[in-house]
Amino acid sequence: MAQQHLDPTDPTAEAVTGDALAGYLRAQATEFLRALRLRRETGGNGAGAGARGHAATGSAQASVDAARALRRSARRISGSLHTFRPLLDPDWSEEMRPELAWLSGTLGLEHAYEARLDRLLLALHRLSGSTAFPAQTVTAAAAAPVDVTAGGRAAATAGGGDTATAVTAGGRAAGAAPVPLKAAPGTGGPAGRTAAPERGNLTVGAAKAGALLERQLTLARTRAHSTALQALGSSRFHAVADKVAVLASEVPLTPTAPGTDLRPLAAAAQERLTDAVAALPLVTAGHPYNAEALVHGLSPEPSPHPQDGPWHQVRLLLRLHRYAREVLHGGEAHADVRLLTSGQALNRHRDASEAAAAAAQAARTPRITPATAYALGVLHADQRHEVEAARFAFQQAWQRQTVDAP
């Protein structure tokens, strides 16, 4: 497999030393402090628990952007400390990395739950094939039946493939009729063909499944919002912010780091990535149906899916490799299309995997009706198909050869 488009090193290129690492860390620390100041100026409450599904405006949007920038700079600082740790003070580095990981993870939970809920409700609507998704507050006797197509289940592509529709919190609560979705191009049928009842019904189970997911994930999102606010006001966060403020002016490099070439350490990060990709079951990812993945997800065992772990690890290693490239090339780092498309596929893989797990967890809720359990099972299978599609997309992107310019 050709690797010329992934190389962070070039024997003929000029050496990149620890001074470049110091400059990169200072720049990221400055971005962190700038985002923190913006968040404080905008109140720091984000969109809030009651505003989900509506476009945040003004200071609320600015606060959301500030939290995103905090996470972005925290990830880059933490990733650089990991890749180039031999050039940094070991005690400081080992103390700083887990704190930055804690901060990034805490700030990302609320958005993750919100995006997961939107993804699952949109998938339920797509699978139903109805012109109006049933209101989740409607009782079983009053809810209209909803049909699901075999084609809709089969046409789970990496990008979703469906016509976009706005699904707002108000629309879900008040029974607003979103724009009908159409079947995506792919195994489900020709492009543009509207979903039609061919096999089975979701009936009222789709509405009840949506209501159950809404309750569970909204509660989780609200708790994550509160946790993030508490974290940002804690002494632990202030200690991290103080250390980042010091980093913005003084990087604790080792005495030999300023003259040490960074390229071997960046190459090691690339090698870890390529080794992890080589261990992935890319042949299995080339098949459109992975029965083992579906069987495990429908079992009563609530543990994480065993097939997903290596893919999540590759996603993290790909991120570290990208950050190492940023350190080497600075603002002149050219976008590698292969890395970009591979990363997007792995992000879709993560999102679909977590959505499938949420559907399976909801299906384990005690005393739900068989129709609700059936709808959640169909939803889980749909998301596991999305996982397989994302793996196939990653395989195609990763193995794509780069044509050298003449």
Image (cartoon, helix red, strand yellow):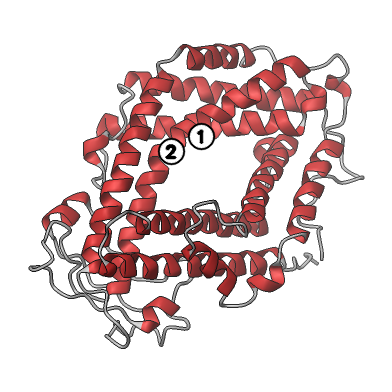
Q: Distance between the residues labelled 2 and 1?
A: 6 Å
Q: Are the residues at dot 2 and dot 1 in contact (C-beta closer than 8 Å)?
A: yes
The mark total stands at: 2
Which quarter shows the N terminus?
A: bottom right
In the rendered image of this protein, does residue 119 appear above or below residue 113?
A: below
Q: Which residue is the site of mark 1?
A: 105
- The picture quadrant where one finds residue 399 is bottom right
Judge from the rendering whether residue 73 lies leftward or rightward of residue 14; answer left or right. Answer: left
In the rendered image of this protein, does residue 278 appear above or below residue 221?
A: below
Judge from the rendering whether residue 62 lies leftward or rightward of residue 348; answer left or right. Answer: left
Judge from the rendering whether residue 362 lies leftward or rightward of residue 19; answer left or right. Answer: left
- Which residue type carries mark 1? Gly
Q: Work out whether residue 312 or residue 292 is closer to the camera in this orientation and state it.
A: 292
Q: At 36% across and 71% down in the image, what residue appears?
A: 162
**Furthest residue in direction left, as rendered:** 142
Which quarter shows the C terminus?
A: bottom right
Would you say residue 149 is visible in this rendering?
Answer: yes
Q: Where is residue 76 in the image (x, y as percent from the top left)?
A: 62, 33
